[in-house]
């Protein structure tokens, strides 16, 4: 019995130290019925939008031993999944997933496709194409192509998307960091 108590307390301590940082998660799902006119007929389509916001919870290091320490502001990762049902069966026919990032106070949408992802920039209420990122299997990076440059992109340990490209005017390497939307 004594050995059982020791083993149980050891497992409890190991479980406490093995935990990851806590994360706040806010999930919202909305379903709308939309009527669309196709070939002169009025057709009903169901649109389901699932929005997930995740934010890591961090306490100010100077308050780490306090019971109610102050939180540090951390980036929020917003992921939207849009599903459309074109017919009246219970399954959704199309699914699109979007993750939002920010660069210089401008919002960018990263939309995955079969070769990597497409990046669009939010301009008012409209989304304008910004570029494409194509997966390179060689070193876990992406070849990023925009109207202004072509470079290499990768996700760092903070889940920031970093693009590096050569600038001919300055004869140097330019680095841009796209941080998860706050």
Image (cartoon, rainbow, N blue to C red):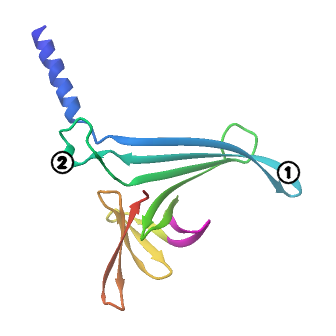
Q: Quadrant of the N terminus?
A: top left
Task: Identify the residue at image location x=20%, y=48%.
Answer: 61
Q: Secondary structure at mark 1?
A: strand
Q: Secondary structure at mark 2?
A: helix
Q: Residue furthest bottom?
A: 169
Magenta highlight range: 117-131
In the figure, 124 relative to 21: above or below?
below
How many neighbours does mark 1 have within 10 angstroms: few (below 14), some (14-19), or many (20 or more)?
A: few
Give coordinates of residue 87: x percent, y percent. 75, 44
Give coordinates of residue 108: x percent, y percent. 49, 65
Q: Residue furthest right?
A: 40
Task: Identify the residue at image location x=44%, y=68%.
Answer: 105
Residue 31: assigned label: none
* Residue 115 visible in the displayed image: no
Q: What residue did someone put label 1 on?
A: 42
Q: What residue did someone put label 2 on?
A: 62
Q: Quadrant of residue 37?
A: bottom right
* Residue 92 visible in the displayed image: yes
In the figure, 23 relative to 132: above or below?
above
Task: Identify the main secondary structure in magenta.
Answer: strand
In space, the residues marked 1 and 2 are separated at their CA atoms by: 62 Å
């Amino acid at each position: 019995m004594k050995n059982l108590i020791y083993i149980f307390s050891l497992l409890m301590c190991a479980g406490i130290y093995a935990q990851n940082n806590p994360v706040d998660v806010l999930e919202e799902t909305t379903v709308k019925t939309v009527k669309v006119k196709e070939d002169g007929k009025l057709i009903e389509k169901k649109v389901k939008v699932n929005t997930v916001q995740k934010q890591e919870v961090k306490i100010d290091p100077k308050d780490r031993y306090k019971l109610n320490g102050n939180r540090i502001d951390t980036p929020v990762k917003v992921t939207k999944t849009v599903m459309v049902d074109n017919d009246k069966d219970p399954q959704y026919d199309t699914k699109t997933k979007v993750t939002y990032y920010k660069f210089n106070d401008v919002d960018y949408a990263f939309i995955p496709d079969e070769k990597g992802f497409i990046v669009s920039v939010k301009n008012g209420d409209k989304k304008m194409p910004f570029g494409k990122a194509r997966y390179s299997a060689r070193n876990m990076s992406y070849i990023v192509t925009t109207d202004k440059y072509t470079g290499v992109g990768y996700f760092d340990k903070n889940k920031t998307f970093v693009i590096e490209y050569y600038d001919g005017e300055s004869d140097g390497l330019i680095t841009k960091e796209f941080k998860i939307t706050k």
